[in-house]
Image (cartoon, rainbow, N blue to C red):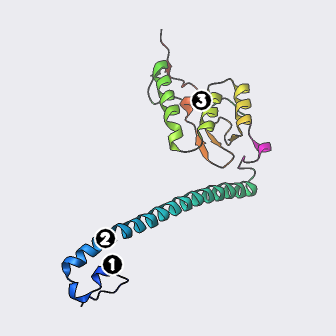
């Protein structure tokens, strides 16, 4: 049985003699906009709180990742170059051979594709730009670029590097040097 109390319906619906389904429908139509506004306000607040919490959790995750990386480095200082004084001095990569002979133009295109897509796989854009500048520079200038950008070189040929937050940057050999089977245009 449906009861009509003054807290549920406007005063016109509290009279039992006038209470019928038509009035209930009309009554809810009057109350609906108020209820919907309250629900939307609550929903937007929940979304806002959820967004803030997600950002805080991401920041905490990043900090924990960097902290755990530093702890690992502290335990394995001979294997890890996290500390600035253990940053390795750069050297030329060892000679390597491409699976099939490649032209200078193909190598250039492959390098461009790598540098265009690398930042989308993680890490900071500024670090990728510094790595590209270092990879394309002479060895002494490359060392200066790497040091000034705060890049930690794990392998001296720059194939594996880290930023100060512990993000890993892997560079393929083809961006660091030319293959031995490079076909020169004549």
Query: Which residue is located at x 40 percent, y 65 percent?
Result: 37
Circle 3: element type? helix
Q: Is residue 182 left or right of residue 81?
A: left
Query: Is label 2 in contact with label 1 (beta carbons under 8 Å)?
Result: yes
Separation of residues labelled 1 and 3 (CA atoms) = 78 Å
Q: In this view, does 71 lie to the left or right of 65?
A: right
Q: In this view, does 43 lie to the left or right of 78?
A: left
Circle 1: element type? loop
Query: Which residue is located at x 20 percent, y 82 percent?
Result: 20
Within-10-Å neighbours for mark 2: few <14, some 14–19, many 20+ = few
Q: Mark 1 points at which residue?
A: 10
Q: Is residue 62 left or right of residue 25?
A: right
Separation of residues labelled 2 and 3 (CA atoms) = 71 Å
The label shown at residue 23 is none
Q: Position of residue 131 (x, y in %)?
A: 63, 33
Q: Does the magenta stretch include residue 85?
A: yes
The label shown at residue 30 is 2
Q: Name the residue under label 3.
A: 176
Name the chief secondary structure element in magenta.
Answer: loop
Read off the magenta span: 79-89
Say which label, 1 or 3, has the lower sequence index: 1
Separation of residues labelled 2 and 1 (CA atoms) = 9 Å
41, 130: nearer the viewer: 41
37, 66: nearer the viewer: 37
Q: Position of residue 1 (x, y in %)?
A: 24, 91
Vertically, is 72 above or below 185?
below
Q: Where is residue 160 in the image (x, y as percent from the top left)?
A: 62, 41
């Amino acid at each position: 049985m449906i009861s009509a109390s003054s807290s549920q319906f406007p005063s016109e619906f509290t009279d039992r003699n006038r209470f019928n389904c038509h009035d209930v429908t009309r009554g809810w139509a009057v109350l609906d906009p108020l209820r919907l506004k309250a629900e939307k306000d609550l929903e937007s607040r929940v979304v806002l709180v959820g967004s803030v919490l997600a950002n805080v959790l991401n920041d905490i995750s990043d900090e924990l990742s960097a902290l755990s990386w530093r702890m690992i480095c502290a335990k394995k200082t001979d294997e890890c170059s996290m500390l600035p004084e253990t940053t390795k001095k750069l050297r030329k990569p060892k000679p390597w051979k491409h699976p099939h002979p490649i032209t200078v133009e193909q190598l250039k295109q492959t390098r461009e594709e790598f540098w265009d897509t690398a930042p989308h796989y993680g890490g900071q854009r500024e670090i990728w730009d510094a790595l590209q500048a270092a990879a394309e520079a002479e060895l002494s200038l490359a060392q200066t670029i790497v040091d000034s950008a705060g890049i930690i070189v794990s392998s001296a040929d720059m194939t594996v590097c880290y930023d100060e937050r512990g993000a890993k940057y892997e560079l393929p050999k083809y961006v660091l040097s030319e293959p031995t089977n490079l076909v020169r245009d004549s």
